[in-house]
Amino acid sequence: MTKNKIKIHPTTVIGKNVKIEDGVEIGPYTVIGENVRIGKNTRIESNVFIEKNSIIGEDNHIFPYVALGKDPQDLKYKGEETFIKIGNSNRIREFVTIHRGTSEGGTTTIGNGNYIMAYSHIAHDCKVGNETIFVNGATLAGHVEVYDFATIGAFTGVHQFTRIGKYSYIGGYSVITQDVVPFSRVVGARPTYMLGLNSIGMRRRGFSRDSLEVLKNTFKFLFFSDLNTTQAIQKIENELEKTEEVRELIDFINSSKRGIIKKISLEWEEELV
């Protein structure tokens, strides 16, 4: 079997102990730091900066002026040995910044198949799952966890240690200071409002009508009733089918440390239920 040729522009600067696998393309004026690994068939365009201790998987496309693996923006950081790890088949658009972890061995991780649009920022020690979308200017503070298939709208800011649940959708220009539960839609800046089930996005992902109906009833108990969260979960446990999605939703809420976004806008309430 013939190996795919590695193509590196002559103006590229490459540090020590760098491993570049078959089929990689690196454009002009890109700088690769020490101890970097770049997986097969990844394309890196011009003027990209990839700092030390960055592990990048296969079939990624990194656009101009991206900065990966720079020092974390954290006053506690004192030069510890930290990392970023990026999976496969991600598209990372212009001027995106993704920073290494903070404490010794700390790692910022990005999964597979994510689309991270221009000017987005992923801070130190974040964990991003698979097939998420970061719309232009979406910003994560440190230690944020974004679960699979979530969408973060344009110029949204997410507070440190917050979690963004699976299949959730955050509208643009939002400020997220509490956990966003799986399958939900939220939007707004101080306060942020719950807009109900992300039914359109989930239908696009192949969820059945029956699955969506169970989740819709779950959301009614949680967000559109006079029950508190504990009472709503008890009612769900007693009265609704325990689908995989319902169980995931309840487990997510029970493990929340910052609380969840629950506030409903009266302007939207009739439409949402």
Image (cartoon, grey):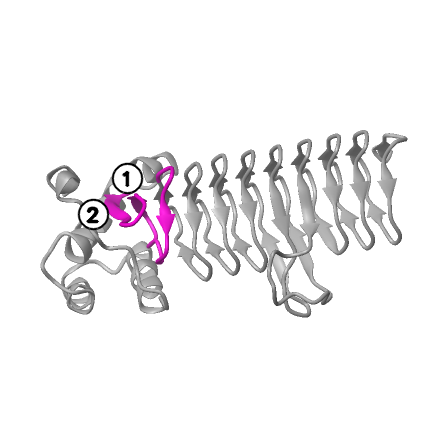
Left or right of residue 265: residue 116:
right
Which numbered disc, 1 or 2, marks the residue that appears first in the sequence?
A: 1
Q: Is residue 151 above or below residue 9?
A: below
Q: In this view, does 6 lie above or below 180?
A: above
- When asked about the image quadrant of residue 242, the answer is bottom left
- When asked about the image quadrant of residue 101, the answer is bottom right
- When asked about the image quadrant of residue 63, the answer is top right
Residue 179 in percent (x, y) is at 36, 58
* Label 2 sits on residue: 216
Q: Residue at x 50, y 54 (%)?
A: 141
Q: Is residue 236 above or below residue 12?
A: below
In the picture, the quarter occupied by the C terminus is: top left
Q: Which residue is drawn at 45% across and 62% down?
A: 161
Dot 2 falls on a residue whose secondary structure is helix
Residue 117 in percent (x, y) is at 54, 35
Q: Examine the structure image and report whether residue 196 is included in the region drawn in magenta.
A: yes
Q: What residue type is labelled 1?
A: Ser
Label 1: how many residues lie within 10 Å, few (<14), some (14-19) or many (20+)? many
Left or right of residue 42: residue 109:
left
Q: Residue at x 54, y 56 (%)?
A: 127
Range of magenta residues? 171-197
Answer yes or no: is residue 63 visible: yes
Answer yes or no: is residue 5 visible: no
* Label 1 sits on residue: 199
Q: Examine the structure image and report whether residue 146 is included in the region drawn in magenta.
A: no
